[in-house]
Amino acid sequence: MIGWKRPALALALTALLGTAAMAALDALDRANPPPLDLPATSVEVVDRDGALLRALATPEGAWRFKVSLDDIDPHFMDMLVAYEDKRFRAHRGVDLLAVGRAAFQFATSGRIVSGGSTITMQLARLIEPREERSLTAKLRQMARAVQIERRLSKDEILKRYLTLAPYGGNLEGIRAASLAWFGKEPKRLGLGEAALLVALPQLPERRRPDRHPEAAEIARDRVLDRMAAANVLDERETHRGMETSVPTVRRAMPFLAAHAAERALREHRGEGRIELTLSRRAQEGLERVARDAARRIGPRLSVAMVLADARTGDILAEVGSAGFFDESRSGWIDMTRAVRSPGSTLKPFIYGLAFEEGMVAQETIIEDRPSSFGGYRPRNFDLAYQGDVSIRTALQMSLNVPAVRLLDTVGPARLTTRFRRAGVNLALPRDEAPGLAIALGGAGLSLRELVQLYTGFANGGEATTIGNMSGDRQTATLLDPRAAWQVADMLAGIAPPEAAAPRGIGYKTGTSYGYRDAWSVGFDGRHVLGVWVGRPDGAAVPGLSGYASAAPILFEAFAKSGLPVTSLPRPPVGALRTARNDLPAMMRRFSSPGDALRENGIAEAAPQIVFPPQGARVELAVAEDAAMPLVLKLQGGRAPFRWLANGRPLDGSSRRRTASWQPDGAGFSTLTVMDAAGRTASVKVFVEQIATER
């Protein structure tokens, strides 16, 4: 009896002591839980796909980023567990086998041969850092590791470890290390890179690649050798990893879209992650173009660009200056938002309104001659005049007088009303109404606003508000679809600047008065890109021009944006290119009904047909099978005059205000007179022939 009672009593006592110990541990655990709240991580500004554009260090000056295990290279995860804690998934915080092995090696050799710390124990040391290295400190880590394992899953433990692990200097966590040492996110690590990042946390300062590259390489190769011995990697992969070079320079954290990121950080203070609509690839491409262009065009000049999706309104790239820290170019000023004179870049919208009203076609002739509009006498950029030109040529050559002539007809107020409908308010002189000078840049707007207006040409006449934060976008009809297509078609015919490859885009340039601003805005069937070049302080730059200075940058930026070329919009129903000879007589030459030419303060009225009057029924006698001619009379206008009957010109032109017309039959006819200024007047009459007796 006594023989079996003693073991039973011992077992019961052991169980009792175990239960008491567990209760004591539970009480201790509740009384002194581990501090599992993560410290602050770096604020991130990311692009539309989550790629990092800009980050801020933590308040204590560390680079520490949030981590997702799904965004880490699988090879790194396999190597980390195999190298640091191969029974990580099985133990409960302390690997007794590893601890026993380490103790035995220390006892037999007198030095530390291998460590017994698990990843969980290392996490315990990271959340409660202590300089003390003793048996008591190790036992405390073990206790904390057990506590951690009771509260967190294995993936949560890994996530915290890879957020806090030291990688040299002020780098904490796998993302900060991968960005600083390799310039990439940890999802794209190579084998050698992953092995180096496995080795660094054990001795982060002694193995820093920028200070101790040889030690870093030895540690990396040791990791790869052990992975081969553990059959985590094969021999070929191991050699491939060892052949890669160790980085010797620490990279700066991404600093893209500086102005946009600065504004987002101010407006969303307190948020840990701010997402912009930008595309990192496009942003990098445009920033390189801006830097290179600024070096070419000279000191003190800056470059700004905005690239937007015309359909969604998302800004895909935004360059506020050629260099944020470039003091000589005032790089801290965001020139995408600065209000400047747009030069000739608003002319296409004037032509669009004229197309909308049916006043012109692409081959309509318009005058480019010295003219006065109530005392306002516009001149062309080159101070020369082309005479009679087509509407297409006038826009493509950016002639000033034709643009002002059209604006005088459609009305400046109407143009600014359309702009307001599209969300753009031109900056005008205080207490002044919109005037004809708008056609040549006599108003102010920003590059962002200009790009917003041009979305109408890529989007069938519908302008879309643009922005770099996700949100509702507004669209508004800027132009009739047919008018928008006609203008876009003409802009697509402008030759690329010298040495630029054709891109399949429509574009317009502009130069502000005094050579202060150079502009170029281009579009395909989906995207709009605007470029500004000039001095942020508004000083004049002799020789600066939209075509020579900004247009080459536009074509280069489109090519290096990484965006596919999208075909220009297809013509909508009813939008046609019509040869001049096929145009109605009234549209072959532009004139404004009721327009008056003013020279030396004297108003000269437009021509007016006084006989026959509009709608008259004219009786003409017919003798010997021939109708008598009809006398035509007009008032006003400038000689010489040319008459047309049913679209066919009568013989020659005359300075007289009377003419004769021989009808070719009875019925309705249209009579038109055109003066030297291109102004026309027409009447429709019914001719009735009456036979006379012999």
Image: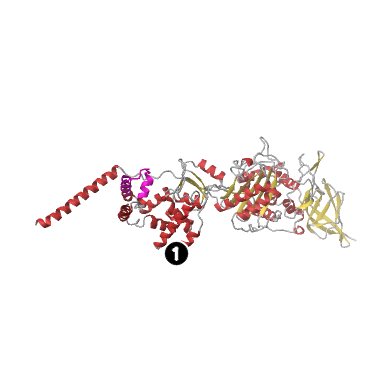
Please, which colouring scheme is shown?
secondary structure
Let me know if residue 141 is in the magenta part. Answer: yes
Q: Position of residue 105 (x, y in %)?
A: 32, 54
Query: Left or right: where does residue 636 sit relative to residue 272?
Result: right
Please indicate, yes or no, whether residue 170 appears anywhere in the rendered image. Answer: yes
Residue type at tag 1: Glu
Q: Residues within 10 Å of mark 1 (few under 14, many from 20)?
A: some
Please indicate, yes or no, whether residue 72 appears anywhere in the rendered image. Answer: no
| Residue farthest along the front direction in this orientation | 109
Q: Position of residue 288 (x, y in %)?
A: 61, 50
Q: Position of residue 300 (x, y in %)?
A: 66, 42
| Residue farthest along the top direction in this orientation | 431
- Locate the N terminus and report the quarter of the image it occupies: bottom left
Q: Is residue 294 above or below residue 665?
A: above
**Is 300 or 113 nearer to us in this picture?**
113
Query: Left or right: where does residue 446 sit relative to residue 217?
Result: right
**Segment tinted magenta in the rendering:** 121-145
Q: Position of residue 262 (x, y in %)?
A: 54, 42
- At 56% from the left edge and 45% from the top edge, which residue is drawn? 258
Q: What type of secondary structure mainly makes up the magenta span?
A: helix
**Is 591 or 147 nearer to us in this picture?**
147
Q: Which residue is mark 1?
A: 235
The kind of secondary structure element at disc 1 is: helix
